[in-house]
Amino acid sequence: MNNLKLLMKIFFCTFLIVLFNSCSSSDEDNSGDNLFLQVNVSGKDYASEGLYATGFGGQENCLDNGDFFLQYVGEVENSSLYIEVSFAHFENLIDYSNTQKNNILSSRVVDTNSIWTFSTDGINSNFCNLNNDLSIIYEDKSTDTYLNLKPNTQSTHKITKVNFLSEDSESKFYIIEGNFNCTFLNKNVDVPVSGNYRIKIEVLK
């Protein structure tokens, strides 16, 4: 489990480098976009602050499905827990603009720790089915344990708004808002998690 968290931290540092380069090259100003992640864990509220959007991570070649990006949304961390939230979306406009493939009504919440697993052929079949899904990674730091969603318990992820923001010669930018509700299982204890977000994604022309 320590290796998984180390890999996530390395990814996040790499993500920030990509983010800064992307921001400087696209002249996109995020300061007025009001991007956020708010999370409630067992009745306690947390807010993620920091840099979001226009940087990509977890790119996969999904062949027939179309290429995906795993968009970093935000994270919450204190002495007892670590939560990281990401959003999977189509990389290319030809897939993103296909309303049959890009159906926002089919979105879910997943606890996809497997996203961070590298396959030998560069294709992660688990990741290739995650379009518009929200990935939540939850670590109980007191036991150094990554939690999974409670089996046979309903989880919801609803995308409430998708707005075109701007475009340049290479990309189109969209603002996406949504909310989520799910239950993780820590041994025999239910851990309810809910929240909402406003993120910015980039889709390549």
Image: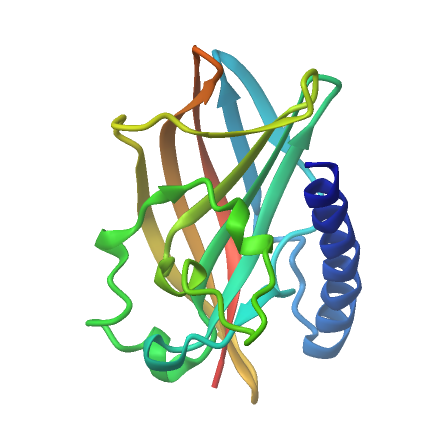
Q: Position of residue 95 (x, y in %)?
A: 34, 78
- Looking at the rendering, which quadrant does residue 6 occupy? top right
Q: Nearer the viewer, residue 82 or 30?
A: 82
Task: Report the residue at 38% width, 57% height from top.
Answer: 130
Q: Position of residue 94 (x, y in %)?
A: 36, 84
Is 115 left or right of 109, judged from the image as shown?
right
Task: Report the residue at 65% width, 69% height from top.
Answer: 28
Q: Is residue 115 above or below residue 61?
A: above
Q: Nearer the viewer, residue 201 or 154?
A: 154
Q: Position of residue 193 (x, y in %)?
A: 45, 24
**How are the colours assigned in the image?**
rainbow
Q: Is residue 45 above or below residue 146?
A: above
Q: Position of residue 198 (x, y in %)?
A: 49, 46
- Residue extending furthest toward the front: 120
**Quadrant of image for the N terminus:** top right
Is 37 left or right of 177, judged from the image as shown?
right
- Looking at the rendering, which quadrant does residue 138 occupy? top right
Task: Report the residue at 77% width, 72% height from top.
Answer: 21
Q: Nearer the viewer, residue 125 or 13?
A: 125
- Residue extending furthest toward the bottom: 169
Task: Report the residue at 42% width, 54% height from top.
Answer: 176
Total number of numbered labels? 0
- Residue extending furthest toward the left: 100
